[in-house]
Amino acid sequence: MIALLLRDLRLAVRAGGGFGLGLAFFLIVVVLVPFGVGPETAVLTRIAPGILWVASLLAALLSLDRIFALDFEDGSLALLATSPLPLEGAALMKALAHWITTGLPLTIAAPALGFLLSLAPEAYVYLLVSLLLGTPALSMIGTFGAALTVGLRRGGLLLSLLVLPLYVPTLIFGAEAVRRGADGLDPTGALLLLGAITAGTFALLPFATAATLRINLR
Amino acid sequence: MRMSLWEYANPKRFMGWTAPVLPVVFGLAGVCLVVGLVWGFFFTPDDYRQGSTVKIIYLHVPAALMAINAWIMMLVASLIWIVRRHHVSALAAKAAASVGLTMTLIALFTGAIWGQPMWGTYWAWDPRLTSFLILFLFYLGYIALWEAIEDPDTAADLTSVLCMVGSIFAILSRYAVLFWNQGLHQGASLSLDPEENVADVFWLPLVVCIAGFALLFIALVLLRTRTEIRARRIRALEARVRRA
């Protein structure tokens, strides 16, 4: 399992792996928002939690179709399915690799972008914590979506249609935690529910992902 | 010989028993809808606060109810397909999806028409309204996945898994949305709690309308399932001709 994780990480970091693209996309979305809504600081402060969460969600979406597509094409996914490692474990590692290459950098970069959107100073901690808790769920749900569309030639658009509704609860709790933090309210409830979603997805979705992969490899 | 319930799921047998049943269900649905709607629209008093706008309830509540029930039916059909591999079950789930999508749209539109005079707005980010919009997106994704995959068995398998996972997330979203915003929408129109229930004058025609919508849903799903089975047969015949 560790070997698979390291292999995926190495592939993602290499040239053409798309590492950093998601991060650049995150930056561009956040930079575009003030052009759209105007530069008033008060407005930006108000919408910053939501914008940061929506932007990180879209950035995570961008690299989802790479999770299985290349392995499916060159046949290594079929090898993985026949290897002694259970496919559920492989799915889990794929999600983890996706999180380390997109979710984690996004989380680390988010405070800097929060600065651009003049996020309320009290909210930085909660932004960091909520992204740290929530982005793994985004990766795991996305891995499931990628497994559903792996056999399709143009699955990218369909993938976003399938995955984005599944992101709704994560987005609500994540953005709500930051907003409550910014307003000086207690965000513990939202953070706990966010953690619960992440734990739940990591407990259950590997099985659904493995099942869909088996169907697609049949 | 003992007959099992599952015998009725054999495609040939399904075509056999639905052919005579279908017009009956359509007829009953028509009768219920005509009686319920005419009764509701012309023979009930106006509400003391809402005036005559309350009458849209006879379309809004049944459609909303069936929009949710259609998804539950799809979930059950998907489970049956995954466990017992009855093709009719998978096709029925596929058939129910677009009917459910239409019901969701009807509920959203009649709700918007009702919301304008009552709340002064066509749309508000109220938990119930938002949940229905999310349900609409789930239906879209489900139907899109069916359309995208060529092999019918793979499509049935994948959409079944999506339906199951989607159900969990739909319920999660429903309660997440409650956490996010408190609403304008009234409580349940039909409930065992007499305080929450609508008044009896409105209740009886409403129940008739709900029965009408439920029957209409069953009739449409049966009809569409028959169409799917025929389409499948045509595909099989064409494949045989090509091989010959």
Image (cartoon, helix red, strand yellow):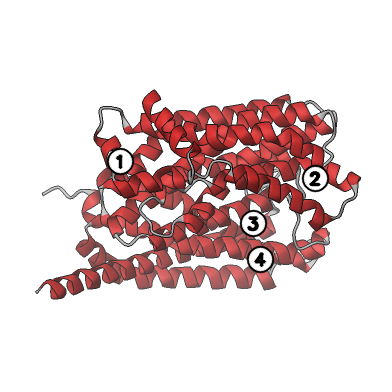
Residue bearing the label numbered 3 = B203
Same chain under badges 3 and 1? The reply is no
Left or right: B195 with respect to A166? Answer: right
Assign a secondary structure to mark 4.
Answer: helix
Same chain under badges 3 and 2? The reply is no
Assign a secondary structure to mark 1.
Answer: helix
Residue bearing the label numbered 4 = B109
* CA gap, disc 4 and disc 1: 48 Å
Where A13 sits versus B241, above or below?
above
Q: Is residue B161 visible?
A: no
Q: Amino acid at mark 2?
A: Ile
Residue bearing the label numbered 2 = A47
Q: Nearer the viewer, mark 3 or mark 2?
A: 2
Residue bearing the label numbered 1 = A76
Left or right: B27 with respect to B150? Answer: right
* CA gap, disc 3 and disc 1: 61 Å
Nearest the camera: B180 or B63?
B180
Q: Nearer the viewer, mark 4 or mark 1?
A: 1
Assign a secondary structure to mark 3.
Answer: helix
Rendered residue at 42%/71% (across/down) = B26
Which sits earlier in the primary sequence, circle 4 or circle 3? 4
Nearest the camera: B145 or A128?
A128
Assign a secondary structure to mark 2.
Answer: helix
Q: Amino acid at mark 1?
A: Ser
